[in-house]
Amino acid sequence: MSYLVRDIGIYCLFLLVLFILANGQADINAFLLQDHLTRTFIKIGHRDLDFSSKIITSDHFWFWSQTVILTEMRAQRWYNNEPPYGLKGYLGDRVNRIMGYGILRQIRSDPRTCVPFSKIRKTIKRCSGRRSWDPEETRNFCDGWSALETSKSSCQREEFRYKTAAEFETYSMEGKLGYYSGGGYEIKLNGPQEDDLNKLKKLQKLRWIDKYTRAVMLEFSVFNVNVNLFSTCTIIAEFNEGGGITPKWRFEPVRLLPHTGPFGYLVSICEIAFIIATVLFTLIEIWKFNKRMDVLALTIGLCWDELKVFFIGFGIVFFAFCCLFYFMFLTAIEDFARFIPAIETSFKMMLGKFDFAAMNRANPYSPILFFVFSVLNSMILINIMLTIILSAFNEVKFDLENKENKYNVIDFVWSTVRQTLKLEKSPDDSVTPNIMDIKTKKISPNYSNTEELPDKVSQLMKYISDVYFEGNINLNDPSAVKQIIQGQLPSASLHRPSFQPQRSRLMSGGQKPVISSD
């Protein structure tokens, strides 16, 4: 009982350490900062500047950039028109400081990868092509994308020169419509507000955003010293091939600097305790490694043939429903607008996450199909898979329970290492008989069958009487038996008193033996 209480106490203490560590990284201010940045830049619900619904053309995007970005990324004048002294580098809210400067980064399609159809090539000579990673434009251009740059001196604006992800020190990212690399064409927003405004207006006239633009991203980072939180900010405007803009944004608060004060020391102590506990628990689990650790591998190996057949059948059924939902909701539900997201959404439906109202509005037959999909995949097929795995698990469990596991893995490895380094004598594997055991077995009498001795003696005496005395010895007479044991001839105990022992002598000349008495 004491061991159980001790283990429960250690487990509760470990959970407390995890809670302190998780709570040290989580903060209600992270949600408030994210919500504040969303309301500041996205302006959901605004009549003209709502990035989520009002930005549908490139002109709208330029207007939003010149109005919202340049205004909110700099601390504006005070109410009395005084400059915000001491707030250089702060956002318009005067509490979040921008780290470095913001940039607008453009991803373009390569026009060489798209060729119009031959029947309309005389009318439409160019096309932008589909959104993809491979045909991304990486060449340098002059102003207005008019001609290829042959040298850096031939064009003055760096906004038309391509930079790689290494130069930006960024990574690829995912939008709603596709994936985008870390490179692109850059507009730096690092000057005074008036200069940046003139730069954006000039680039708008030079058609920096045109039909080959696939996405424009606003990227910057801020730090709020009051709550000790950084935040990476990414706002993406994806220009659709069919027209329009698909917006996406992400504000990610993160704590990079440790806590200060008593709580900071507590978090540091818990971090050290967590590392020590993790190492100790890992070593203990490895030390306890035995025949049960490979249950999963043995189970999968045993039922793998059945699982292969199941996965083939499941894949056919699931893929058929994915195709069905994709073609049904292609133009009605955004999650089914592309095939890969349609597969992901179908898998989420198996887990119980779905928008039934949207599917019902898109197609009146969707409730019936959704019911069949749920019953067939979530109930029947999944239970078949569980039955296969559990059946194999029971067999493996039974085999392991009857299997000996005498040696510990760590002990074996450690002993092998010591033997290799000549720090421990190798065990003698030769087979040698134990002489002492053999001598002991020979010398030590065995009295296990002493109770059978009288019966054995009686059988022996009866055999002697039958063979040598033709059964004439009275074995019930103790004196007769005693005389036989002593080697004397019992005379009084014979049934025929005239009987005398005789011996035969072989006569010469081939005569018959003559029986005579001694």
Image (spheres, rainbow, N blue to C red):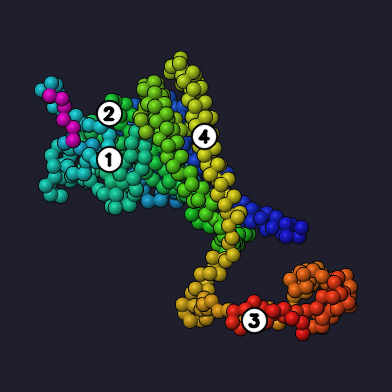
In the rendering, at what x and y percent does residue 197 appear? 31, 38
Looking at the image, can residue 96 be seen?
no
Task: Give the residue number, with chain letter if any, for mark 1.
Answer: 133
Above or below for 355 versus 428? above
- Evaluate if marks 3 and 4 touch, with contact meaning CB atoms under 8 Å apart: no
Q: Is residue 239 left or right of residue 456?
A: left
User: Marks 3/1: CA distance?
Assistant: 124 Å
User: Marks 4/2: CA distance?
Assistant: 44 Å
Q: Nearer the viewer, mark 1 or mark 4?
A: 4
In the rendering, at what x and y percent does residue 116 appear? 16, 27
**Magenta region's main secondary structure?**
loop
The magenta segment: 113-118
Residue drawn at (59%, 65%) of the image: 406
Task: Tell me the element at label 1.
Answer: loop
Residue drawn at (84%, 79%) of the image: 490
Task: Give the residue number, with chain letter if any, for mark 4.
Answer: 384
Task: Give the residue number, with chain letter if any, for mark 3.
Answer: 506
The numbered mark at residue 202 is none
